[in-house]
Amino acid sequence: MKYAFFPGCVSRGGCPELYPATKLICEKLDIELQEMPAASCTGAGVLQEKNELLGDTLNARTFAMAEALDLPILTICSTCQGVMSQANYRLKNPEYLAKVNGFLAEEGLEYKGNARPKHLLWVLVEDVGLDKVLSLITRPLGGVRMAPFYGCYIVRPTDALEFEDHPDRETALEQIIETIGATVVDFEGKTRCCGFPILTINERNSMAMVAKHTLEAKDLGADAMITPCPLCHLNLDSFQPKAAAQAGRPIGLPILHMPQAIGLAMGISPHELGLRRHIVNTTPLELTLGIPER
């Protein structure tokens, strides 16, 4: 099983632990990742607010590269998934696609409209199959109560994300949690914004959102939170101490990238998965799993 790999910016920048964790579990799952080193940033929705045509052209450029490889696109960032899906949805308009291709022609590229960007979360559920994932679990996360956090971009708008054709996408993260042996802690905020998009313009409200989500999950008994979005991880993990101070309550809820949680269940060491890079200490979670303290 081979994909054109689009890791996005954050998995090698703000959350560099995500990239190697992804590579480790994909190797075990026999998922071959073909890098696209010349691919551009998706624009993360920020660029699209200012210049939608430019943002869509950058994404069409990446799509054309994947078409040239004759491979589907795999991404590990919910924000990238959402932005690419929305761009691809708009590019279904033949006149708009022709306009975008006019810009791509300067680089000798053409997007024919066949790309289907797909998050690793969906690939595991729909392509690899959860039975395959389960067969590789050597250290089930039994005794761990885990809250799912989808964030915004991987759940809306549902038409661009093809939820009607793939209804399992609505509960894919919960299915992963159950497959790796943990207990799902459902909570209302799992599909809401983490607060990252407003961090630089309204830090107080962003911290309030971090505190609300993490405290809600912890009050319901969660030992950890799992997310398929590195931007959500950045806000919920890196800024959790500041959010706790603002809320006047300790939190201390570990936030795991989805590949890290799967990797732990596959027996990969916390060190290899980059858990030591987190701001919120993951040692209590590791001790629960019987992993010796380092």
Image (cartoon, grey):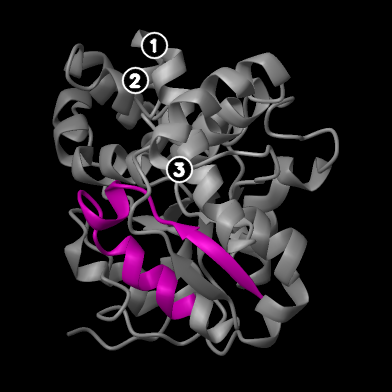
Numbered tag placed on residue 49 in the rendering: 1
Q: Is residue 21 magenta?
A: yes
Separation of disc 3 and disc 1 at Cα? 27 Å
Bounds of the magenta span? 1-25
Residue underneath mark 2: 46
Query: Going 67% across and 69% down the picture, which residue do you hit?
Result: 179
Position in image of residue 35 (x %, y %):
42, 65
Q: From the viewer's perspective, is 181 left or right of 197?
A: right
Considering the numbered disc 1 on the image, is that residue within a helix, a strand or a loop? helix
Q: Earlier in the sequence, mark 3 or mark 2?
A: 2
Amino acid under label 1? Glu
Residue 40 shows in the view: yes
Rendering quarter of residue 79: top left
Separation of disc 3 and disc 2 at Cα? 27 Å
Q: Quadrant of the C terminus?
A: bottom left
Query: Going 43% across and 45% down the picture, which residue do you hit?
Result: 229
